Image: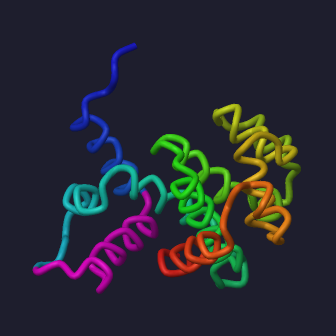
Amino acid sequence: RSAQPLDDVQRELELVLKQDPALSYHLLKLVNSAAFALSSPIHSFGQAINVLGRRQLQRWLQLLLYARQQEDGLAHPLLPLAAVRAAHMEALGKALGWDRDQQDMAFVAGVFSLLDVLLGMSMTEIVAALSLDLDVVMALLDRGGPLGELLSLVERHDRGALARAGIDADVYWQAQLQAYHWA
């Protein structure tokens, strides 16, 4: 199967955004925020997708799953933790010399690591319903493989775990600071 042209993907994303007013609102609010410091406001979904880029848009959408309002009208409190965990894992992956795909998988494992609590389901049920990379599945189900070790480290760090992972304490804390800044 050939790769879908970028224009077709962008049109599909725009269609999804048009069907979800809350999602559209949050996207335009994000790209017009001070964080982007754009000289002129963004008004269309196409412009917003171009400003964010597909990779960042995908991450934003993953995090938005956590931000959906609960019955009490408040945003889910797991959003900040999921964002920090995901960004922290990505930054540590980069520090370990992982390639871009491995760093992306680290981000996904981090952001999805709280879905069981969020959805009130077992992680086994969740990963069965998703088409995730095997390394991400192993990390989420039993903290196995390099991603699982990194996830365990981010969840409960200690000096021994840092040493076993080959991560300097300063590198760990810098990555965490970067993650908090990103989130």
* Extent of the magenta region: 20-39
Q: Residue at x 54, y 62 (%)?
A: 91
* Residue 124 in magenta stretch: no
Q: Residue at x 54, y 65 (%)?
A: 64
Q: Residue at x 75, y 62 (%)?
A: 114
Closer to the camera in the image, 126 or 153:
153
Compared across the picture, whether 156 is left or right of 54 comes to right
Residue 150 is drawn in which quadrant? bottom right
- Quadrant of the drawing holding the N terminus: top left
Closer to the camera in the image, 22 or 50:
50
**Residue 23 appears at what percent x and percent y?**
44, 65
- Residue at the farthest top position: 1
Is any atom of residue 2 visible in this view? Answer: yes
Q: Is residue 21 above or below residue 33?
A: above
**Residue 11 appears at what percent x and percent y?**
27, 43
Q: Is residue 109 above or below residue 64?
A: above
